[in-house]
Image (cartoon, grey):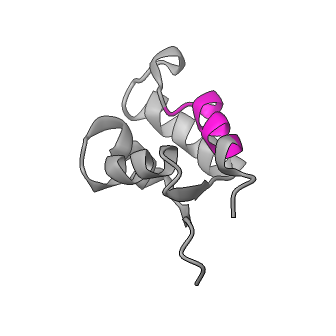
Amino acid sequence: MTGGPVRVVFDTNILVSAHFWKGPPYRCLLAAEAGLAILVLCDPILSELGEKLMTKFAVPKAENRLDRGATTRLRGAHANRG
């Protein structure tokens, strides 16, 4: 282990939890945004996230702070590290 940021994969449940509450999933997302971890995402997870936020929680896409654009920017910001 080199001591650098660890790579993490958040499933849809973790991302939904980070969207609505300020618990450990939210803090983990903040750690990834700060560069302490490398968030690894894929299109199927992002698609499921968008679908669940809109269908189960009635979150309009425009109000979704974890939408595809936001998470793609986050993924791109950390893609070249490690």
* Image coords of residue 18 (percent x, y): 36, 44
Number of numbered discs on residues: 0
Most prominent secondary structure in the magenta stretch?
helix
Q: Is residue 27 left or right of residue 80?
A: left
Of residue 31 and residue 71, the one placed in the foreground of this image is 31
Give, as a single range, the part of the protein colored magenta.
66-76
Q: Residue furthest top?
A: 62
Residue drawn 39% across the image and 24% down it = 58
Q: Is residue 10 left or right of residue 69?
A: left
The quarter of the image holding the C terminus is bottom right
Q: Is residue 14 above or below residue 71?
A: below
* Image coords of residue 33 (percent x, y): 50, 43
Residue drawn 52% across the image and 15% down it = 62
Q: Is residue 21 above or below residue 39?
A: above
Q: Is residue 22 left or right of residue 5?
A: left
Q: Is residue 79 above or below residue 54?
A: below
Q: Residue furthest front?
A: 3
* Image coords of residue 23 (percent x, y): 24, 49
Residue drawn 63% across the image and 41% down it = 47
Of residue 74 and residue 51, the one placed in the foreground of this image is 74
Q: Is residue 14 magenta?
A: no
